[in-house]
Amino acid sequence: MRSSLLIVLGLLIGIVGTVFAMNALHDREPYSHTLMTTMAHHAGALSAAVKAQRCDAAQVQHHLSRLLETQADINEAFPGVDQPFKDEATKLHERTQAALQAAPADCAALAIAMKPIGETCQSCHQQYR
């Protein structure tokens, strides 16, 4: 009885240790996760505005400019990545900059401006996620 209790206790300690180790490995680069979460927030706000048909020009400009500013940190957040990833990041930056310069005034224009940005995000996530 005592040996079976020690075996079960050892297994539980091993499981808990494994969970802690996996969490530590997952959290070792929180900057990249935070950067992607911030970009998802701004892109999501723009997408929600289009869906709700409430595209306030000031809010659109705010979210596009914040999205552009956040993208400037992609290379820093992902050190040591290969050149194709950097090319995708550059393409995303250029497409967001074009959307910001287009200054979409209504939801139809915003939807058109967001389409290339969404395609670039989706392409990158399929390759690197």
Image (tube, rainbow, N blue to C red):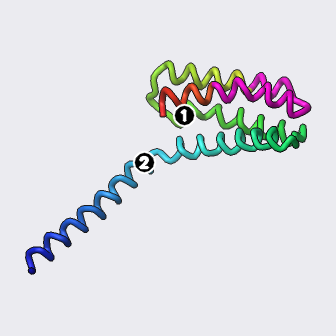
Instruction: Identify the residue at horizontal 77%, vertical 35% (top origin).
Output: 65
Q: Position of residue 102 (x, y in %)?
A: 85, 24
Q: Residues within 10 Å of mark 2 (few under 14, many from 20)?
A: few
| 59 to 127, vertically: above or below | below
Q: Where is residue 108 in the image (x, y as percent from the top left)?
A: 86, 29
Q: Identify the disc placed on residue 28.
A: 2
| 104 to 25, vertically: above or below | above
| Farthest-out residue, bottom | 1
| 15 to 75, vertically: above or below | below
Give the residues in magenta. 97-119
Considering only order in the chain, which callout, 1 or 2, is on the residue closer to the N terminus?
2
Q: Position of residue 91 (x, y in %)?
A: 64, 20
Q: Does the magenta stretch include residue 18?
A: no
Instruction: Identify the residue at horizontal 48%, vertical 30% (top origin).
Output: 128
Instruction: Identify the residue at horizontal 59%, vertical 40% (top origin).
Output: 36
Q: Identify the disc placed on residue 63.
A: none
Give the left or right position of residue 129, taking residue 58 as reference: left
| 5 to 129, vertically: above or below | below
**Picture quadrant of residue 97:** top right
Q: Which structural element holds mark 2?
A: loop
Instruction: Find disc 1 in the rendering and name its residue.
Output: 76
